[in-house]
Amino acid sequence: MNQNRVGFDFRIARKILNVSIPLMGSMVGNLLMLLVDRICLARYSNDTLAASGPAIYTAMAIVAFFTSAVGFSRSCVAQAYGRSGHGEAAYQAAIGIFVGAALAVILLLLAPLIETIPFLSNRPPAITHLESQFLYWSCYFGSVMTFNMSLSSYFNGIGKTRITLIAGLIGQAVDIVMTIGLVFGKFGLPELGMRGSAIGTLFGTLAILACYLSFMPSDVWVNVKKLIVKRGDHILGQVLARVKKGFTIGVSAGIDNLGNAAFIWIIAGLGSIALAANNINLTVNYIGIIPLIGLGIGCSVLCGKAIGEGDYPQIPRILFVTLTIELIYVVVISFFQIATPEILLSPFGLMGKPEEIKRASIATSQVLWTYSLAFTFSMTGAAVMESFGLTRFLFFTRFILMWTISIPTIYVVTTGHVGDANFLPTCWVIGSVFEAIIGALYFWRIWLAVKHRQNDIVLAHAES
């Protein structure tokens, strides 16, 4: 039998699903939190509906930089686990926790600056004031998310993703109750509107933190203590090396999410109808892509472990099986986006809207499958490239394709369609084409890395 043959392997599929299903469950739970958040803000007032899209995208762009920078620890843990087992994995997790705590503090200190971002736009003052409220509190829940990421990276890196699922489900339950209560003033809680949404998320992230702290094994904390006590130049070098790689990934994730925020701002140039239709579709788009992230992370964990073991021929097989599962999901969700758009859109603000907003919303929903398909390749490719440590290629590809070509192209074409809400679906298709190109470049680079048995992650060993 040809050991390099690429095909659907049920044994690999079982491994991928064992790692990924809990992650997918956690991602679906995050989606549920987002749905509750958007529904609450959509039903609280027209102003909070209008502010929710830009505020959430901007907040997550900033938070994604910090969480992604810390999340690189997952690849280090996975490689260490594949190479040497639990002991080295615990040491790599300790370095990640040290970095996560530092970045969490930095994000918290940036809150007064970040809350001023909405006032740089020309949107109505009532809307920008609400966005500012959300962004201020997003620094608080974002700092907890950042530290949580450093903790979850250990569990995900060694394949114990069920712990991530349990922690996520508990946190999501707390988040949903607190968000509903704090937005509308239910359950004896104060009515805080837009702020209540962000503060509810903060309570949810704190619940997740409590779960991770209770599950974390003692040998990880022993290694954290050693890092703090020794504080030698070699320790600093290991931390800085992790920060350097993580920073590149964080910047890449940040510019990706800022690109999404810029897309929303550009869409505003098409007029209020297009902006409203786009805001309604944002959550439906999340339904199409968020569960895929769980599969992508699971794929990267198994690829990282294979790299640590030196089993490079296994990587194409892992990728093929992962993509097959992902594409099955995309086909299913795309059917509903195309065939039953009104059912999908109704909970997120479509009901009661003027006919022109409904038409633009439905037309946009029916082309979202193009983005889901492109995202499958770009997201999975990015996750696997991270497991190789190929962070510079990840960054430059995303930056050049998105910020020097894709975003400017969409901006130029929208300037010729001011007030034309019917042009909104075309904007989504243009963005999807560039996302697909990014994905193709990622997979080409992965192919080269496998061919040349490349590994750009240098792991330091724990000291006894």
Image: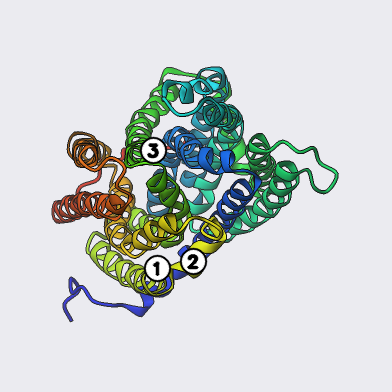
Frontmost residue, 414 versus 114: 414
Residue 162, compared with residue 457, is above or below; it is below
Which residue occupies the foreground of this view, 63 or 126? 126
Viewer-nearest residue: 398 or 429:
429
Q: Nearer the viewer, residue 126 or 428?
A: 126
What's the residue at 45%, 40% (across, down)? Answer: 57
For marks 1 and 3, give the CA distance: 22 Å
- Label 1 amino acid? Gln
Tell me the element at label 1.
helix
Marks 3 and 2, the one that precedes in the sequence = 3
Which quadrant of the rendered structure holds the N terminus? bottom left
Display colour scheme: rainbow
Q: Quadrant of residue 284?
A: bottom left
Mark 1 or mark 2: name the one nearer the start of the chain.
Answer: 1
Residue picked out by circle 2: 344
Q: Which residue is mark 1?
A: 337
Asked if residue 73 can be seen in this view, the reply is: yes
Q: Which residue is mark 3?
A: 261
Tags 1 and 2 touching, CB below 8 Å: yes
346 displayed left or right of 255: right
Q: Please tell me whether mark 3 or mark 2 is closer to you in this view.
A: 2
Q: Residues within 10 Å of mark 3 (few under 14, many from 20)?
A: many
Q: Amino acid at mark 2?
A: Leu
Q: Residue furthest bottom?
A: 1
Q: Is residue 293 visible?
A: no
Residue drawn at (41%, 47%), measured in percent from left and top? 273
Q: Are marks 1 and 3 in contact (CB under 8 Å)?
A: no
